[in-house]
Structures are given as structure tokens and as C-alpha cells.
Image (cartoon, grey):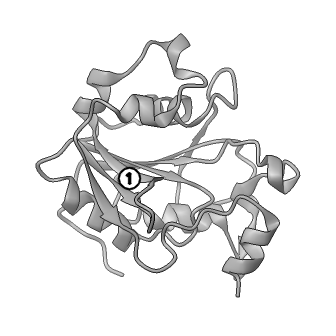
Amino acid sequence: MDFDLTAGGFCGVVLAGGTAARMDGVDKAGVELAGRTFLAYAVDAFLDADEVVVVGPAGVRTERPVTFVCEDPPRGGPVAGLLTGVDALLRAPRLVGVLAVDMPRVTAGTMRRLRDAAVGHDGAFLVDGDGRRQLAGVLDAARLAAVRPDLEGQHGMALHRLLEPLDLAGVAAAGEEAVDVDSWADLRDLGR
């Protein structure tokens, strides 16, 4: 897949600092599917991004340069992770992409569809077959800054609460895009 040269001002945040409780606490970024790590898939999804920040431990190597950061205190949830990632960006993005590391079927094409759907909105998120928003989306950076809670309010905050005041488009997942791997059984099923 070629670079999208019209994507200037797009940066990505990969959320890779979860507890993976149903996977014995493994670092999901290093879990492999078809010989590639989940982190490699996530970074590939941000092919068009000017910059990528990974929020989580820096234990897994990437082919593309990324910045690793951890929220303080660690394991503060997706809102704390997203906002920590945005704070670590060296560039001032127009659009911020966010992706959970355990969604290896999200691709650069998915992110392009999300960016296209976000036009005229505050952002766009992937939705599964049941209409549930998944942790794969793009947000207008200025609108995200406008709804940002204070530092204490970020930790443990549900993502839907942060996003509630925003006008977000939903993008129907194609194929297995909405699959997130929360257990070893999920990984086994995805690998079939």
C-alpha cells in the first residue's frame, strides 16, 4: 500500500499499556499473529501518520521509529493513555488516530476510511456489527483538546464519557477489523 500524501497533520497513538488480565498479564504488544507482533500491525495501521506514539512498555521492537511513553501512574485506562500519547507528540496534529494494540486487523486502509468519515465531524470510530464503538478511531485534535478533563479526571475515565460531547461518525467494520484479542481463545480463533 502506498503512502497517502494528503494525510499531512495526521498522527497516531497506539494504546499498549493494558493489563491483559484474561491473557495472564502478557504484554499484548509482543503477542504474535502469523509471525508478526500486534505492535507491528498497529504501527502499520498508521502508515500515513507523520508520527506514532506507543503508550505502554518499550519492550517490543518496531521497524518504524516510534516514541514510547507510559501514563503516570501507569495503567490509567484508555483516556489517560490517549491523552498521554497526544501530549508526547512532537508535532501539533490536525487529526489524531487512536488504536488499541490488540486489534491486529485494523489497517492503514481502515484508518483512511476513518479519516474520510471524520470530515465534517469531530472524528470517526470503527463500529462492530452490533453498532458498538471500538477502540479504533480518529479525532479532531482541537475538539479533543476542548473536551479534555484535568489530569486527575483522566485516570480510570471511561472512553465513552470523554467522547460523549463530540460529534462522531461511525464506520462499519469490514471483515475482522473490529476483532480485539482479549483472550488466548480470541487469538486462536483469529489465527484460523
Count how many numbered circles sit on residues in the image.
1
Up-down relation of residue 48 to residue 118 (above or below): below
Up-down relation of residue 157 to residue 167 (above or below): above
Left or right of 148 in this view: 75: right
Q: x%, y% of residue 102?
A: 63, 59
Between 120 and 34, the one lying in front of the other is: 120
Left or right of 108 in this view: 78: right
Residue at image x 44%, y 28%?
Answer: 87
Mark 1: amino acid: Gly
Residue at image x 41%, y 17%?
Answer: 149
Q: x%, y% of residue 62?
A: 62, 61
Q: Which image quadrant for residue 114? A: bottom left
Q: x%, y% of residue 124?
A: 29, 52
Q: Quadrant of the N terminus?
A: bottom left
For label 1, count other residues whose C-alpha is less than 10 Å away and answer few (under 14), some (14-19) or many (20+): many
Secondary structure state at the residue bearing disc 1: strand
- Asked whether residue 86 is in view, the answer is no
Q: Which residue is mark 1?
A: 137
Most extreme residue toward the bottom, as rendered? Answer: 192
Left or right of 167 in this view: 82: right
